[in-house]
Image: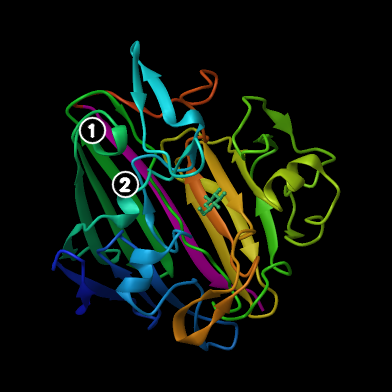
Amino acid sequence: MERMPFGKTADGKEVSRFKLTNAAGAYVQIINYGGIITAINLPDREGRLGDVVLGYDSLEEYVQDRNYFGAIIGRTANRTENACFELEGVEYKLGKNEGNNHLHGGVAGFNKALWDAEMVGSKDGESLLLSYLGKDGEEGYPGNLQARVRYTFTDKNELVMEYGAISDRDTVVNLTNHSYFNLSGHQSGSVLGHKLMICGDRFTPIDSALIPSGEIRSVAGTPMDFMELTAIGARIGWDDGQLLHAGGYDHNWILGNGGKVPEKAAEVVDETSGRVLEVFTTKPGIQFYSGNFLDSVLGKEGALYGKRSGFCLETQYFPNSMKHKHFPSPVLKAGEEYRSTTIYRFSVVA
Ligand code: BGC
């Protein structure tokens, strides 16, 4: 594993970029600012390496970024309505960073934190262990939360993300990664031709602020039906209320897994390059976001990322789950351990 300097934060702290290489010569780059995955270089069907995640060249651009490129999201992913929740009769007010709502951990979420980093060996491949102490009251959340993320890049081209956390007070935790993929290569333009399958037959409909209303709806007969591999763009332009709210896909699908071992949640096939991404997780939900808000973002190597030039598959507890008691609970009790695993497995088809 290599460790290279990647600039300094505004308060003078060194940021490093780590390179995890596997036996096949594929590699992943991660910085300890935001735990951001800055590159994932994988072979296409011809064996040519290409970088399949959107990103920037410099630390300054990641500091300015509002798209959450590649970052770890915490303390809670996605939206909390009115930026407040109630836990054991006490109301907590969170940072508002999207109108009246709280998105992706607030103004200074875990994606803007400097994480401690340790390179560790593992039988499965090179690993990077990141840790960060989210303070009691930070962005309004209760409890000092010691969070850990271990990234391992295996010889089978799997990026394994193991999340852990422990708090000294009862709190809420919902950690994810916000990588934007384009399996043709990060600079390849639209992802609408990629084919997607999601292992869920129900989703949580949103309102015009993109917040789940609490309803659980079948995907049957709707453009949300990705039970079989279907082009992302096949129905994205339909005159459908759910798509219109979000300007495309930006919804949470309900996965049927038991939460103990990672189970398959989604698959994406890019017939152009032959690259395939499979997502496995212990989490109960997955947000499929079709990059609707990307708007001429100047990225790595001079790339210009337009609308829908990358997609995200963010494993998670359902958004706004503190408001809807029938959603799986993101509450973490004091002293108990939060654990979840998500795997991005890459391969190629002929
Ligand atoms: C959300 C989108 C949001 C994007 C970047 C996604 O997880 O679902 O609505 O625009 O993150 O903030």
Amino acid marked by disc 1: Gly
- Label total for image: 2
Mark 1 lies within 8 Å of ligand 1 (Cβ measured)? no
Tell me what residue is drawn at x 72 percent, y 60 percent.
232
The answer to which of 311 and 200 lies nearer the viewer is 311
Eyeballing the image, is 38 above or below 215? below
Q: Position of residue 42 (x, y in %)?
A: 47, 78
Front of the two marks 1 and 2: 1
Q: Main secondary structure of the magenta part?
A: strand
Disc nearer the start of the sequence (1/2): 1
Amino acid marked by disc 2: Tyr
Residue under pointer 1: 137
Q: Position of residue 164 (x, y in %)?
A: 27, 43
Q: Please identify the quadrant where the N terminus is shown.
A: bottom left
Eyeballing the image, is 183 above or below 75? below
Q: Residues within 10 Å of mark 1 (few under 14, many from 20)?
A: few
The answer to which of 50 and 81 lies nearer the viewer is 81
Q: Please identify the quadrant where the C terminus is shown.
A: bottom right
**Relative to 302, 252 lies left or right:** right
Tell me what residue is drawn at x 31 percent, y 46 percent.
163
* Callout 2 secondary element: strand
- Kindly identify which numbered label has been placed on residue 32: none
Residue under pointer 2: 163
Eyeballing the image, is 324 above or below 298? above
* Callout 1 secondary element: loop
Q: Is residue 330 magenta?
A: no
Magenta stretch in the rendered image: 336-350
Q: Position of residue 76 (x, y in %)?
A: 39, 39
Real-space CA distance between mark 1 and mark 2, rounded to the nearest whole angstrom = 21 Å
Q: Residues within 10 Å of mark 2 (few under 14, many from 20)?
A: many
The answer to which of 303 and 123 lies nearer the viewer is 303
